[in-house]
Every structure is written in structure tokens, then in C-alpha cells.
Image: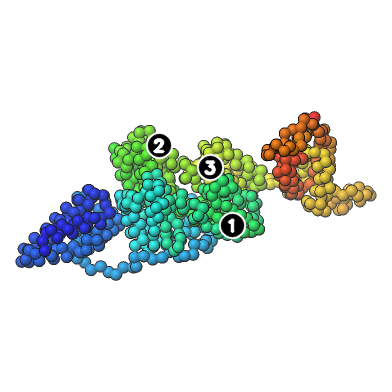
Amino acid sequence: MTEHDFDRFLTALTRQLRLKPEQKVAISDELRDHFEERMRGLILEGVPHDEAVRRALEEFGDAVGLARQFTSLSLRPARRWIMRCTLATAVAGAAVLLMLNAFTPQPEGPPLIGQLTADDGPAAETTAAPTDLGMVYVAPATYIPAPLTQPAEFDFVDTQLEDALALIAEQHGLNIILEKPALAEVGIEPDEFITATANGDPLYLLLNRMFDNIHGVTLAWLQEDEVLKVTTAEVARGDDRMVTRTYPVGDLLKTISEEQLLEAIQAGLEGPWMAPHGIGGTLTLIGNVLTVRQSQEMQSQVQALLAGLRTSAPIVAVIEPPEHETILRALDQPTELDFHHIPLADVAETVSDLHEIPVRIDVPALAEVGIEPNQEVSITVSGIRLRSALKILSESADLQGVSVRFIPWNGVLWLTTAEVAEGDDYLLPRIYDLSPFASGPALLEQFMGLLQNETEGPWLDVDGVGGVVVPLGDGRLLVRHTHKAHAEVARLLAAHREALTVGEPVPAPDPDELVTEYYTMDASTAEDLLATIPGLVARGTWFADNTDDVLHGLKPDHPARRRIDSTGRLYKVAAGTRQMHVAAPPTADRKEGPPPPSGEVVVVPQAVLIVTHTRDVQKQVRKLLETIDKQTATFENSSFSGGELGGGFGGGGGGGAGFFSLPTE
């Protein structure tokens, strides 16, 4: 056996290495040095030349196995120091470790590949616990396959995607399949280099960070056929990968309406959903059972949102991992930073070590705006909160006018661009409980306006883009927005709550107090409602036709008189007329669209319906009129002035303090 055999060994080894070309050359040179040194040592011990070559080569072992061990070794966090050294030092250190590993018997390990459970049904509900900051987290891990919630320890630095997944599969006993055709369609190859680190984080968070942005493409994982498949996010959310699940929601419908529940899901989660977006998943509510057809990712978020709606707390974070709590606490700690022309990556590492939180850089997003991890920055601050220091750093002139953000994301403090951090992909749903100071739908609507007008936003309802806010019938608001907007919302609501505790409390309205409200409508509709309302709302509590006969002869303090005096009353008062254009009769050439006016005008008598009853009954009356108005508006035949309750009739309380909404004659 000659040195040429070792040359062939090195050739086979470097072919198996999943590393960059320059790294392969350096490793090959370093291993040759170690081989020659070992061979010379054997010769000095009296071993013949050919035998020394053979023994030295045998000690290196199988080329394929050695390449796999080297790749694995370079990725493990226990060897993280190797990746921080120079290339030459790293190769030398790795080679020594490999030599020791080759000469040491290895214990039997666990099976390389295990299986995910085939049952991808919803996990059992768990009760979330409040954190130090008063926010409750509905942990996403509760609704994710158990193997993906196990702690992960990896340090991938410029590691090929396929190799990283192979090591994850080996360490966690998983079957992982990379859907190469789907990735190839968007220009992603299995040998793409990725960088991601996990120090005890749940495995799913590591995968989310790995897949977030690979050359502008987001990947996703899903569980099918008892294996974990990795594909593009677009494919994972496609119609053919959707699953159908049912959820009991009877308990939720006791406090919020069906419409509010459906809107909370469709507006609070990314979707997409067929109803508002025209593509995506669907929701069907029959009785107390909600049926959802959506991607696996969205199904887990639906479960988390339903759990959040069942959770009582001032603020409920629906799909954020509890690991963010540690980061938020650290951001409020005092800090001292003194950097002068230090690479951004070193700043992130120092902050991570100083405050004991994981800090990661969104390298692809920053690269798109010309910022690299070696970009030098300077900052000197002392005695201020970490969040303030990072805000100063994010606006530093050293960043060439690029605005960046530090936000909690996927279990780490994520350094990315402001554009990314404030984009739709980073909107998060949280539930805010306003019931202690905002009972009733009217006050909730006012607080919705407060948030949309007094925070920076943007808000979809106001600006056409941005976050959304959904009122819930139990005195809560569901807000889906960025971290920055949520911070504004929390501060604003906390300030309002504090102001209420300082000021004189406003007494709650008496539900049994008699109030009067006024509704303008067509006279014929008012006539019908005079007979309909007493039969549908609070039956037996309305002033009857023979009430005057009953009252005759009763003393003012008689119990029967007081009971009759407290019953509801309905009156109709003439209120002029309105003109209505009559539609032209249908013709054969008009296929669709509303019929044009015929030119004929009909004068419709108007009336004001006056309703006097308790506050609670008035709510029932309004609900009835809203339902009637909704149905008549559907058929373009609304009897209420303006076609909608908001503009069609007015309401007032306190025995006539309302207003009339009268059309022009």
C-alpha cells in the first residue's frame, strides 16, 4: 500500500463533504498533514513503510463515515467554538477531534430514524398561565406534533439544507422528506446554504427560522403519511394539502355571536380564507360545531385562537411562543453598551450574552437592503433600557439610512428590516379584555375608534392596509397587528384603565330603567310593528288595550297600578312622506343589474315608531329591527329611512331625549 491509496481516500472523502469548495481543500490539506505525521511516527517505531501506510489509513476509517462525522461535528453546538475560529484553526481542531473520535469506540446510539404519530388531530385543550408581564400565552406547541416540540441543540453555519435536515432527523428520530420538485420550481436546491441556531428551543421554532427566507422563498413543514415533509409555503397551503377538522364551540357562542366568532377567525388569522379573500380555507358553523378546512399550519392556529377565546386574562397572546416572555423582560432591563466600529454580528452576540437571550440576524432580509452581518456600527449608552438602546442602534447613521427593528419572533430577538417587521407576515393576534371598563357594544365600538385614531397603525378599516380589530360580545377586542402596534395598544388601554381608577366612576346604567327610543320608517311598517313587537319581544310586558279600564278606580300607590305603569308602550306618529322611484318592468334585452327607474314616482307616508320600555327590552327591540332591516335590505326593499339602522332611525333614552331622523318631504 502506497501514499496513492491515501490520495484516493482523500478524493472519496472530499466528494462526500457537504461544505464549500475552499473548506474541502483546507480539510484535505490538514488531513494529509495528520496522515503523514502519523505515518512518520509509525516508521520511527520500526513499522515497515507499506505497513505504516496501511495502519495509518485504517485509523482514519471509512471515507463516507468520516465525512458524515465531520459534517455532523461541525454542526453541533458543543463544537460551536470551531465555527468562530479562523478556517485553519477550525480545520485543525476538527481534524484532531475526528482522529480522537476514530480511535475511540463509539457507544450504540438510538435508531437513526423514528416516526411521527399518524394522528394529526387536535391536541387536548390546556389552560394557559399568566406570565410576569400579565400576558397569557396560548403556546403553539400545544397544537403541534409532539416530536417537533422537543428541545433542539444545533448550530448550523453555512450548512447545506439537506445535511441540516438529515442531522435533525438523526438526532430527533424523525422521517424527513424534502419535496425536491416543489423546491426546484422556485429555484431552491437541496444544497442551499442555511444558517440557524437552537440552544434548547423547541424544534419547530428552529425549523421556522430555517425556512423563513431562503433566497426570498419561504418553506414550510407538514405532517403526512407518518413523515415530516418539507416543501414551499405556497404548496403547503394549497387546496390539495388542506385538511378538514371540527371543533365544538357551544361554550363560546354563549358570550359571542356566530358572526363575531367567524370574523375573529377570518380577520385574526392569516388564512387565506375563501369568504374575505376569494381563495383559501372555509368555515362552516352548524349548531354548536365549527367545521374548518384549511392548511395544517392554519388548523393549529385556529385551535390556539379558540383556546385564547376561552382564556380569561387582560391580554392573551394567541400564537406567540412563551419563550417571548423572557425576551420582553430582558428588553426592559437596564443595559450598558459601548461599541466603536464593531460588526453588527458581534453586537448581536454581545447583547445575547449580556442579557442571556437569543439574538439572531435576518441575514437575507438585511442583505436585500445592502446590510451585511459585518457592517460596523457604533453606540455608547449606559443606564437605559435595552429596548431604548436597540431603538437608538436601529436608527444609527452607520446603517446607511436603512431602518431596522429588533422584535421577538420564533423564540428569538430577531434583527430584521423595518419593512419586514411591519409587514403582513409579522401580524400577530392578541385578545384584550376591556370588560372591566367597556361593557356593552356601544362602548366597544368607541374603543375600536380610539385604537384606530390614537395609534400609529396603519389599520385596514381606516388606511386600507395594516392591522384589524374585531369586537367580541363579551367585552373584549381581538387585535391583529405588529409588535410595535400591540405595544401602542397596550399602553393606551393601560392609561385609560388607570385614568378610570383615579376619576369618579360612572355608575352602570340600570337595566330596568324605562327609556324611550324613536325609529323613522314607512307608515305601513310602523303599523305592522305595533302588533308584531309585543308578540315577539318580552311578551306580557306591554301596555294592553284594556289597561285604562284596569287602571280606573285604582289608587296611585296600588301595587297593580305600579306594575302596569312599568310596562312598555308603543306609539305611531305620522311624519310626512318620502318619494320613491318605481322600477321599470323587466325587458328581454336586460340580463343583469338593477332595473332602471321608470320615471314614475310614488309618495310613501312616513311615521315615527316610539318605543318605551326597560333598557334590556330596548336591546331586544333593536335586535329585532336590525334583523328585519337586514332581510329587507337584502331584497332592496328596506322600509327604514336610509336603508340601514345607523342612518335610518335614531335612538335616545331617558324618556324622550332621543332624536328624529325624518326624510325631506
Up-down relation of residue 400 to residue 140 (above or below): above
Q: Position of residue 139 (x, y in %)?
A: 48, 56
Instruction: Report if residue 17 is visible in the image.
Output: yes
Q: Which residue is mark 1?
A: 291
Q: Position of residue 588 (x, y in %)?
A: 72, 38
Q: Is residue 567 left or right of residue 314?
A: right
Q: Can residue 81 be seen in this snapshot?
A: no
Residue 497 - label: none
Q: Which residue is labeled 2 in the image? A: 403
Crowd class of label 1 (few under 14; some 14 to 19; many from 20; radius 10 Å): some
Q: Which residue is mark 3?
A: 467
Q: Amino acid at mark 3?
A: Gly
Q: Residues within 10 Å of mark 3 (few under 14, many from 20)?
A: many
How far separated are the C-alphas under marks 1 and 2? 43 Å
For mark 2, does the 10 Å Cα neighbourhood hold few (<14), some (14 to 19), or many (20 or more) residues? some
Residue visible at 51% across and 51% down in the picture: 317
Residue type beneath disc 1: Thr
| C-alpha gap between disc 1 and disc 3 | 26 Å
Comparing 495 with 450, the one in front is: 450
Of the image marks 1 and 3, the number of the one nearer the N terminus: 1
Q: Is residue 395 left or right of residue 241?
A: left
**Residue appearing at x 7%, y 63% in the figure:** 49
The kind of residue tagged 2 is Ser
Tell me the SS state at disc 2. loop
Please provide percent x and percent y for residue 164. 33, 55
Return the residue found at the far bottom.
Answer: 108
Residue 279 vs residue 88, the one in the foreground: 279
What residue sits 32% from the left and 54% below the top?
A: 155
The reply to whether the C-beta atoms of the residues labelled 3 and 2 are less than 8 Å apart is: no
| Picture layout, residue 11 above or below residue 215 | below
